[in-house]
Image (cartoon, rainbow, N blue to C red):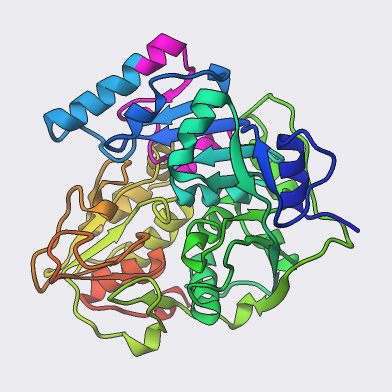
Amino acid sequence: MGHTIAQKILARAAGRSDVQPGEIVYAKPDLLWMYDWHGFDGLMRTINIDPDKVALNIDHYFSPSSDGVAKLHQNFRNTVKRYDIKKFYDVNKGGIGFHLFAEEGHIRPGMCVMHIDPHVSTMGAMGAYCVGVGGDVMAGFLTGEVWLRVPETLKVHLTGGFRPGVTSRDLFERLLHDLGPDGAQGQVIEFTGPALRDMSVDARLVLCNSVQYLSAETAIIAADAVVTDYLVGRTEKPYEVVTSDPDATYAREVHYDVSTLEPMVVTPPDVFYIKPIGEVAGKKIHQAMIGTCAGGRLEDLQVAAEIVRGKKVHPDVRFLVFPITPRTERDANQQGLIDALVDAGAMIGPSTCGPCFGGFAQLLAGEVCLSTGTMNVAGRMGSTEAEIYMANAATVAASALAGEIADPRPLLA
């Protein structure tokens, strides 16, 4: 009987030749990684694993907003010095970790990566097994291993090609719409199929970003030439591409022709209320935001600039753009994207998670934001009486111009 990518990576991490779904294994992470959030710094006061397998980054608070945040950052810096941790990205040194660590070549095919936050599934786009383990991350720092349950695998086979104005974000939202919040309970989602050949690393990272809303353990895409070409010049460390065996066993298999998809919009009250754009077009907005670990990548800035170039943002809309990393902003600037966005009326902000969790850019009661963010529960961005809608970057840009939720496809025809 064959094995899936997840089984192979977990078997290696557990020092075994074979693991089966449902087994509990003690896996040694190749990378144990955390970001700046209150209390997390206290989980790593004692580190008993190779410091080269530890990574820390500051992305939630791009600048201290209180004494508490300043102390959190200082605790990170003290830990880095104490244990000589090389993979540390301080304020304005890296940007949002769930893109940065791929950009810097720290996530390679075949790795086993652990983080507190389940959004680490984003990095499964690199052909690695990347899983959020919550507070159990402390066991990793103390003992060098963490217990994991070997998951079954849900196979999502993709064909066709995306039409203009439709992205991998819409594919994910359609998957969540169709399968529901328990659609991949305790499973790893493996994306396969010929449609992946035309999907960039940026697009794949977005596709894998939020699978915890399907109750999945994580997501993974077998590394191919797109990934190996991306890693050229980013890392000199060896890696092994891991693929599922032809006779691997899957819990379930679903198929999507991405050429049939349309822009999707996540509506209040939470991430499970997803509608085709035609059902929400015309909803007045006050704020449009491109950024977070699910947006702000170079492809997002490219399509946004294409849509707004030579036009002006609606006078009633605050259009905020947060490039996901400083390198992304630099590349966008070199391509003239930043000028196009600023000329249209956008404000370019720092590379930070801040607006997604309500660190700033907050909303008042009755205001509406359309965002490329990851969560839209009441109070996420300020008032509990504000509304948060979410969509792809093209839809956000088109809506910033219109002053209401708008279909981007006519502007990209």
Write the residue at 72% across / 36% down.
14
For the N terminus, the quadrant is bottom right
Q: Looking at the image, which is closer to me, 263 or 153? A: 153
Q: Looking at the image, which is closer to me, 318 or 153? A: 153
- The image quadrant that residue 406 belongs to is bottom left
Percent x, y of residue 225: 75, 47
Percent x, y of residue 358: 21, 53
Q: Is residue 60 magenta?
A: no
Percent x, y of residue 388: 25, 69
Residue bounds of the magenta highlight: 79-107
On the rendered structure, is 123 left or right of 98? right
Write the residue at 52% across / 72% down.
182
On the rendered structure, is 363 left or right of 190? left
- The image quadrant that residue 217 belongs to is bottom right
In the picture as drawn, the residue positioned furthest to the left comes out as 365
Q: Looking at the image, which is closer to me, 55 or 400? A: 55
Q: Is residue 408 visible?
A: no
- The image quadrant that residue 386 belongs to is bottom left
Residue 105 vertical position relative to residue 169 in the rendered view, above or below: above
Q: Is residue 93 magenta?
A: yes
Residue 253 vertical position relative to residue 349 in the rendered view, above or below: below
Percent x, y of residue 69: 20, 32
Write the residue at 36% across / 46% down.
323
